[in-house]
Image: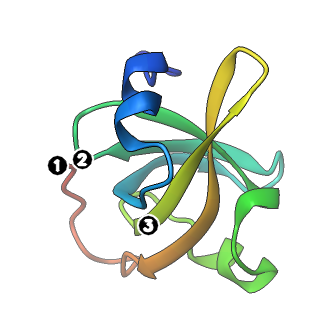
Amino acid sequence: MKYYEYNSEDFAKYDGWYLYGRIRMYDMEKGYGFIYTEDGKDIFMSSYALSSHKQEQYCILGSIVKFRVEQRGERYCAVEIEVIKPTPIRDKLLLF
């Protein structure tokens, strides 16, 4: 699994737009994870980028999120992240 697959071409294409994806991995203790986007790319997410602190409890593998992308240094990361459909814990997880 490769992380940080999001690149400058993707950023130019989606700059300013909201994207949708599923949480691929999230570590609550460390406060970061990765989102698998609709077009098959992975993008970094931080707990600081969640729209509210209460949403961190819903950052479970497979939860659907809405977000925008920002460039930070040479990397791209998700910002304004909103969990729009949390994954029920007992459900089977399917990625795009």
**Image position of 96 with respect to 67: above or below:** above
Up-down relation of residue 72 to residue 23 (above or below): above
Residue 69 in picture, x, y percent from top left: 56, 45
- For disc 2, the neighbor class at 10 Å (few under 14, some 14 to 19, many from 20) is few
Taking the spot 36% from the left edge, 56% from the top edge, the residue there is 22
Q: Quadrant of residue 59?
A: bottom right
Question: Which residue: 71% across, 14% down?
Answer: 74
Q: Are marks 3 and 1 in contact (CB under 8 Å)?
A: no
Tell me the distance, in whole angstroms, between the alpha carbons under discs 3 and 2: 11 Å
Tags 3 and 2 touching, CB below 8 Å: no
Rendered image: mark on residue 38: 2
* Secondary-structure class at tag 2: loop
Position in image of residue 77 (x %, y %): 63, 38
Where is mark 3, residue-wise? 65
Helix, strand or loop at mark 1: loop
SS assignment at label 3: strand
- Alpha-carbon distance for marks 2 and 1? 7 Å
Please tell me which residue lies in front, 2 or 88: 2
Of the numbered discs in the image, which one, if any, rests on residue 96? 1
Tell me what residue is drawn at x 72 percent, y 45 percent: 32
- CB under 8 Å between discs 2 and 1: yes
9, 66: nearer the viewer: 9
Kind of residue at disc 1 = Phe
